[in-house]
Image: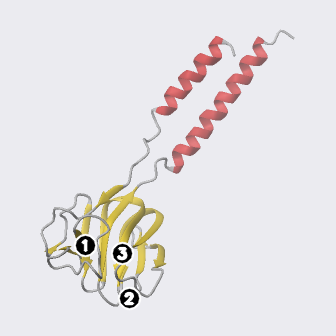
Amino acid sequence: MCRSCRSVLLAAFMFVSLFINVPAWATLVTFEGLPDNLSLSNEISGLFFNGATALTAGVSLNEFDFPPKSGDNVAAALTGLLEITFVDLMDTVSGYFSYADSLTLSIYDANGGLLASAQSAGAGNLGGNELITLGGQGIAMLQVTSSSGFTLDDFSYDINSIPEPEIIFLFIIGAIGMWVLKFFRIRSDPR
């Protein structure tokens, strides 16, 4: 490959790398360090809770029926309704749930439109933890409902690493790069 071609490709690669987001790592919330029986609202940065209470194993949490996934604390929805609103829009939410009756999870966009919904795997999983994950572009709120109380632990949420407009931009830059390579090959070919 000719020297000018390499220079053009290197410059294009460096230019494109300025516009690519670094892959986002999921934010994990373990509810550790919160006092027992605390009614959660905005104690965790970037999240607003409705219907959640921090409970500690061995204090006010029955850890045999509702075991924490990690540590000693969980978020409990004692009334069977939990809502988590995000300051920034998310693309994936997940958590480990313990429940006596089946759960319904729903995610909503900023306008209150339903993005997706899911049911728990069974009618109950006392003594265990079930990982439930939902995804959809632009999640503003997660709502979890049940006919009885349930717990949530190791809650995680994140944003996709490369939004769609940037992927299109990468395709355009790649096409330009291929055209430049072809152009220089034609010019350097002595035929």
Compared with 83, 22 (above or below) is: above
Amino acid type for the residue under numbered disc 1: Ala
Q: Badge 3: few (under 14), some or many (20 or more) residues near its Cα, within 10 Å? A: many
- Name the kind of residue labelled 2 in the image: Asp
| Helix, strand or loop for disc 2 | loop
Name the residue at 53% across, 47% down: 165
Q: Secondary structure at mark 3?
A: strand
Q: Residue at x 69, y 16 (%)?
A: 1
Q: Which residue is mark 3?
A: 97
- Label placed on residue 75: 1
**Residue at the (47%, 39%) spot, across then down:** 20
Q: Is residue 29 left or right of residue 8?
A: left
Task: Tell whether 52 sits left or right of 117.
Answer: left
Q: Decide which of 6, 52 is in the foreground and name it.
A: 52
The residue positioned farthest toward the top in the image shown: 190
Q: Do labels 1 and 3 touch, CB within 8 Å?
A: no
**x and y percentages locating residue 25 in the rendered image:** 39, 50
Q: Between disc 1 and disc 3, whose residue precedes? A: 1
Q: Position of residue 89 (x, y in %)?
A: 37, 59
Residue 49 visible in this rendered orientation of the protein: yes
Tell me where residue 23 sits by quadrant: top left
Rendered image: mark on residue 101: 2
**Is 3 displayed left or right of 29 in the figure?**
right
Cα gap from disc 1 to disc 2, whole angstroms: 17 Å
Using the rendered view, name the quadrant where residue 86 is placed. bottom left
Query: How far is disc 3 from disc 2 in space, using C-alphas?
Result: 11 Å
Asked if the residues shown at circle 1 and circle 2 are in contact, with their CB atoms under 8 angstroms apart, the answer is: no
